[in-house]
């Protein structure tokens, strides 16, 4: 048997349902809508207009299209002074690698040789072989940065004496 609170809730939901259904039925039977054929043709015209506008928005005008690949350099390209677009024109080099080459050159100075170019991530011995005939350098040697790589080359640090070693 439902409690008094449950009965009140059930009664409330029943009244709301009946009022909603009767309001909907009244609107269906007493609405003054235009004839179905006229409304349907107007709706079809609106759909056609929206579809044609959407199709026109998807097409790019001819003048806004991107140009084709950058022009290929005719002679060897100097990688110590070339721009990103010029480097992209080389075979086997895409936009990401060209940006990496320019960023390395800007950070560490000119390459000077193929050995200096190999410091760029993505350029190894096989890529150097492919680029050998199509690139040149300004003959500015790359500055060397000596880095101590072995622990034995570091200067010996003096150890601070321990308290127990200082006892008389």
Image (tube, grey):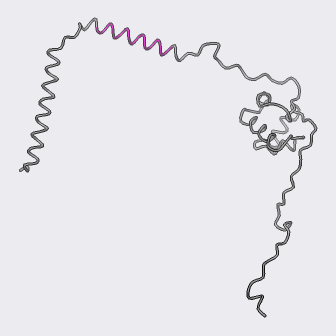
Query: What residue appears at the point 85 percent right and 38 percent down from the top-left corner?
Result: 129
Classify residue 116 by image quadrant.
top right
Q: Nearer the viewer, residue 71 or 165?
A: 165
Q: Is residue 8 magenta?
A: no
Query: What residue appears at the point 65 percent right and 13 percent down from the top-left corner?
Result: 63
Q: Nearer the viewer, residue 34 or 136?
A: 34
Classify residue 131 by image quadrant.
top right
Position in image of residue 39 (x %, y %): 28, 9
Classify residue 14 by image quadrant.
top left
Position in image of residue 97 (x %, y %): 74, 37
Name above or below for residue 70 compared with residue 116: above
Query: What residue appears at the point 10 percent right and 48 percent down from the top-left corner?
Result: 5
The range drawn in magenta is 39-55
Q: Nearer the viewer, residue 73 or 110?
A: 110
Q: Is residue 46 magenta?
A: yes
Quarter of the figure that contains the C terminus = bottom right
Position in image of residue 13 (x %, y %): 14, 38
Position in image of residue 96 (x %, y %): 71, 36
Q: Residue furthest bottom?
A: 168
Query: What residue appears at the point 76 percent right and 28 percent down from the top-left corner?
Result: 85
Name above or below for residue 46 compared with residue 139: above
Is 47 placed left or right of 57 in the picture?
left
């Amino acid at each position: 048997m439902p409690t008094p609170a449950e009965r009140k809730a059930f009664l409330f939901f029943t009244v709301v349902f009946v009022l909603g259904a009767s309001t909907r039925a009244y609107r269906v039977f007493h609405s003054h809508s235009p004839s179905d054929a006229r409304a349907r043709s107007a709706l079809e015209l609106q759909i056609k207009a929206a579809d044609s506008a959407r199709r026109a928005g998807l097409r790019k005008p001819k003048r806004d299209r991107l140009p084709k690949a950058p022009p290929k350099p005719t002679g060897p390209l100097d990688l110590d002074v070339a721009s990103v677009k010029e480097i992209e024109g080389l075979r086997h080099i895409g936009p990401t690698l060209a940006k990496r080459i320019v960023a390395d050159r800007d950070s560490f100075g000119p390459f000077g040789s193929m050995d200096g170019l190999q410091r760029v991530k993505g350029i190894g011995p096989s890529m150097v072989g492919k680029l050998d005939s199509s690139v040149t350098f300004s003959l500015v040697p790359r500055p060397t940065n000596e880095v101590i790589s072995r622990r034995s080359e570091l200067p010996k640090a003096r150890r601070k004496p321990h308290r127990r070693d200082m006892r008389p």
